[in-house]
Image (cartoon, helix red, strand yellow):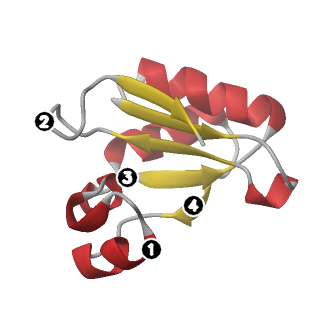
């Protein structure tokens, strides 16, 4: 949360969180990542596109986010950047970028 707040302050624009922290049971229902997925440990999907998406990626690297997922296709309102600070484990090699 501290890193997200610092990123938002430096970006100079609001972050609309499309999906934030989830309990394990709910995450298991809606995500392939199961009961221990990134959102159960505080990941955030920031609804954003265009230049602002580029800026969030730039700041995610600067603030040492270890997971950066990019979903920038389809309707503008459905686009987002996922950020997390998971530590590496058997299921989550880090650092790790991906696209949806």
Spatial separation of the CA atoms under disc 4 and disc 2: 26 Å
Q: Earlier in the sequence, mark 4 or mark 2?
A: 4
Residue ID for mark 1: 30
Q: Which mark is residue 43?
A: 3
Q: Which residue is mark 2?
A: 89
Q: Is residue 85 left or right of residue 52?
A: left
**Could you tell me which secondary element the residue under label 2 belongs to?**
loop
Q: Is residue 94 left or right of residue 29?
A: left
Considering the numbered disc 1 on the image, is that residue within a helix, a strand or a loop? Answer: helix
Observer-side mark, 4 or 1, equals 1
Q: Nearer the observer, disc 4 or disc 2?
A: 2
Q: Is residue 33 above or below residue 59?
A: below
Q: CA distance from mark 3 to mark 1?
A: 15 Å
Residue 17 in sight here = yes
Q: Earlier in the sequence, mark 1 or mark 2?
A: 1
> In this image, 44 relative to 23: left or right?
right
Residue 58 image-quadrant placement: top right
């Amino acid at each position: 949360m501290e890193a997200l707040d610092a990123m938002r302050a430096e970006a100079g624009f609001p972050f609309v969180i499309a999906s934030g922290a989830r309990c394990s049971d709910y995450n298991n229902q809606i995500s392939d990542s199961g009961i221990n997925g990134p959102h159960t440990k505080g990941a955030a999907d920031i609804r954003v596109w265009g230049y602002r998406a580029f800026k969030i990626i730039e700041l995610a690297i600067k603030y040492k986010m270890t997971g950066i997922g990019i979903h920038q296709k389809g309707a503008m309102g459905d686009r987002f950047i996922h950020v997390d600070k998971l530590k590496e484990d058997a299921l989550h090699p880090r650092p790790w970028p991906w696209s949806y």
